[in-house]
């Protein structure tokens, strides 16, 4: 009798096919490469065929692998539909919704949203976990989250998005810096400056890098911030200048003492933030209501800081 095929094996196989390599798939799944290899080998044994071949350019599906991949996709869609049937993703607004959030957004937005969520839907709970945007998208696709709060765009066919707001990025300098007394700063004024950023796993890194290239500034490779707080502290010590999101500035700079000075840039730089979820989920009522509630909080409480999306 052939060995049983497990849902875990199917999920791992689907993730591996999408990733195209064991290392990337194992990281996305949060397991070791040997563990992933064992699960795929067990699936191949149960099916009775080799499903993948290794090439220098990555993995390719065998003819049998292509057939199995199509069947696995259908099975996983049906399993997800069954899971949604008895979850808060339906219309009962009870249970737990798994939300992933980048730490440059969530701490400065979600507390206000959660207050309203608890008032309107007291039986719906949110399980929130922070992660870098790149990891959040992979974890969402792998089913670890029901939805994520992240920087947009997300360019994947299997992910749907709902824009929430445009957020200005403000220049942060130490109080003794030559630009600290300016009412606003032109991008051209940054020529020759050293700019600090978060690691490349964050969208903010790409925006700071692009600003450096257009303004003639230098992106520091010696120091990278591990958080927005760390970036602010490095700026306050005169190690460089940086961009900080307006929500963070309103929460952590203007209300906690001026160890740095923030100024608007001209032309302005923004980031777009939204919610994302798997296309296969459709648009469940829980996501619709959470999206609308978040937009309402932004309109009612943050319109002076953010530009709400329609």
Image (tube, rainbow, N blue to C red):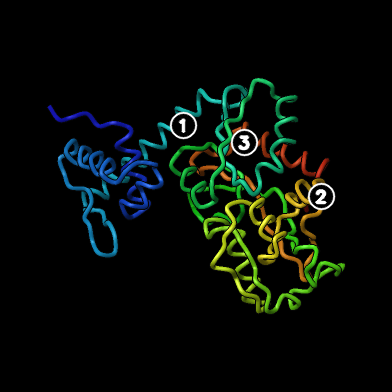
For the residue pair 111 and 139, the one nearer the viewer reads as 111
Which callout, 3 or 2, points at the residue further toward the start of the chain?
2
Q: Could you say where residue 121 lies in the image, as x and y percent from the top left?
A: 69, 24
Mark 3 and mark 2: span between their CA atoms? 37 Å
The residue tagged 2 is 257
Secondary structure state at the residue bearing disc 3? helix
- Residue that appears at 61% across and 46% down: 103
Q: Residues within 10 Å of mark 2 (few under 14, many from 20)?
A: few
For the residue pair 258 and 112, the one nearer the viewer reads as 258
Q: Residues within 10 Å of mark 1 (few under 14, many from 20)?
A: some
Circle 3 or circle 2, nearest the eye = 2
Q: Quadrant of the N terminus?
A: top left
- Residue that appears at 62% across and 59% down: 204
Image-based side of 48 in relation to 242, left or right? left
- Residue that appears at 64% across and 49% down: 104
Residues under numbered marks 1 and 3 in contact, where contact means CB atoms less than 8 Å apart: no
Residues under numbered marks 3 and 2 in contact, where contact means CB atoms less than 8 Å apart: no
Q: Is residue 102 above or below residue 144?
A: below
The residue tagged 3 is 287
Image-based side of 115 in relation to 147, left or right? right
Mark 1 and mark 2: span between their CA atoms? 50 Å
- Residue that appears at 29% across and 60% down: 58
The residue tagged 1 is 81
Observer able to see residue 310: no
């Amino acid at each position: 009798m052939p060995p049983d095929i497990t849902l875990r094996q199917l999920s791992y196989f689907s993730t591996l096919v999408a990733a195209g390599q064991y290392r990337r798939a194992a990281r996305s799944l949060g397991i070791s490469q040997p563990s992933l290899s064992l699960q795929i080998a067990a699936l191949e044994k149960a099916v009775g065929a080799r499903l993948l071949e290794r090439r220098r350019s990555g993995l390719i599906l065998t003819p049998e692998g292509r057939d199995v991949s199509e069947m696995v996709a259908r099975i996983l869609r049906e399993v997800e539909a069954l899971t949604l049937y008895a979850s808060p993703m339906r219309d009962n607004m009870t249970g737990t919704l798994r939300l992933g959030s980048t730490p440059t957004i969530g701490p400065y937005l979600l507390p206000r949203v959660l207050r309203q969520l608890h008032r309107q839907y007291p039986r719906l709970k949110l399980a929130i976990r922070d992660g870098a945007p790149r990891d959040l998208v992979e974890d969402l696709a792998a089913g670890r989250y029901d939805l994520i709060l992240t920087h947009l765009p997300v360019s994947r066919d299997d992910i749907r998005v709902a824009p929430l707001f445009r957020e200005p990025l403000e220049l942060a300098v130490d109080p003794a810096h030559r630009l600290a007394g300016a009412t606003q700063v032109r991008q051209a004024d940054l020529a020759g400056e050293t700019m600090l950023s978060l690691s490349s796993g964050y969208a903010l890194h790409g925006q700071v890098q692009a600003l450096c290239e257009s303004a003639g500034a230098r992106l520091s490779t010696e120091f990278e911030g591990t958080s927005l707080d760390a970036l602010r502290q490095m700026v306050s010590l005169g190690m460089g200048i940086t961009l900080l999101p307006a929500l963070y500035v309103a929460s952590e700079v203007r209300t906690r003492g001026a160890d740095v000075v923030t100024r608007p840039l001209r032309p302005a730089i923004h980031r777009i933030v939204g919610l994302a979820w798997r296309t296969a989920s459709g648009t469940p009522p829980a996501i619709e209501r959470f999206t609308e509630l978040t937009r309402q909080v932004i309109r009612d409480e943050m319109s002076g800081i953010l530009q709400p999306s329609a």
